Amino acid sequence: MTFNSSLRKAKHQLRLDLKYKLSQMTRDERNISNSIINENLLLELKKCTSILCFYPLPSEPNIKPSIEYWLKNNFEVSLPRLHNGKIHCHKINHIAENEFIKSDIGVLEPNPNNCEIIPEESIRNILIPGLGFSHKGQRIGRGGGIYDKFLSTCSPGKFLIGVCFNVQFVDEIPIEKHDQLVSKVISG
């Protein structure tokens, strides 16, 4: 077995383990964790001007309260939209679900007819979802490499913030050359 093959198997098993841990969280645990995460996000990003967020999947931390706060307080908030295999940043003015469209992979994205594209260079902070994170800033996603590809093309100087539940922390994540590290992880 080659190194690459064993690394991919280890990542596959880690994804299964993390999905199982997430499935075992109770509604109360999620609610408490979501409150802590949003409180920590607001403390961490109280003076920034531009944030690329994500619209949370049901298994991800619900960061919508933070997004609503930032929108009400005139932050420039954008969400990613995947088009032709590339992430484009779309400025949003609302977080209401009916303002978004479902992508081919089942993620809610900004409707390109209602939201302007903003240049990635103008974004200082990027919130990044994932299945797991380590204290070293290692991240494992769902396996498509979408965020890694996007982050590898971003201009330097971005503050990359992983967002997760505490059960998604692991000691070590097997990483490959293309995997991108985050600057900080906010969890609850």
Image (cartoon, rainbow, N blue to C red):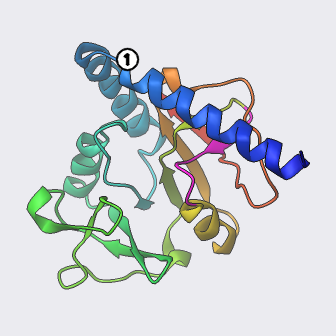
Which quarter of the figure has residue 152?
bottom right
> From the viewer's perspective, is 82 left or right of 141?
left
Residue 141 included in the magenta stretch of the image: yes
- Residue 137 visible in this rendered orientation of the protein: no
Residue 155 included in the magenta stretch of the image: no
Q: Nearer the viewer, residue 156 or 187?
A: 187
Compared to 174, does 89 lie above or below? below
> From the viewer's perspective, is 96 left or right of 35?
left
Q: Nearer the viewer, residue 25 or 7?
A: 7
- Residue 82 visible in this rendered orientation of the protein: yes
Q: Residue at x 39, y 56 (%)?
A: 53
- Please count the marks in the image: 1
In the rendered image, which residue does mark 1 sit on? Answer: 24
Q: Nearer the viewer, residue 107 or 46?
A: 107
Q: Residue furthest front?
A: 1
Which quadrant is the C terminus positioned in? Answer: top left
Q: What x and y, as percent, mark residue 95?
A: 18, 57
Which quadrant is the N terminus positioned in? Answer: top right
Dominant SS of magenta comes to loop
Which quarter of the figure has residue 80?
bottom left
For badge 1, the amino acid type reads: Gln
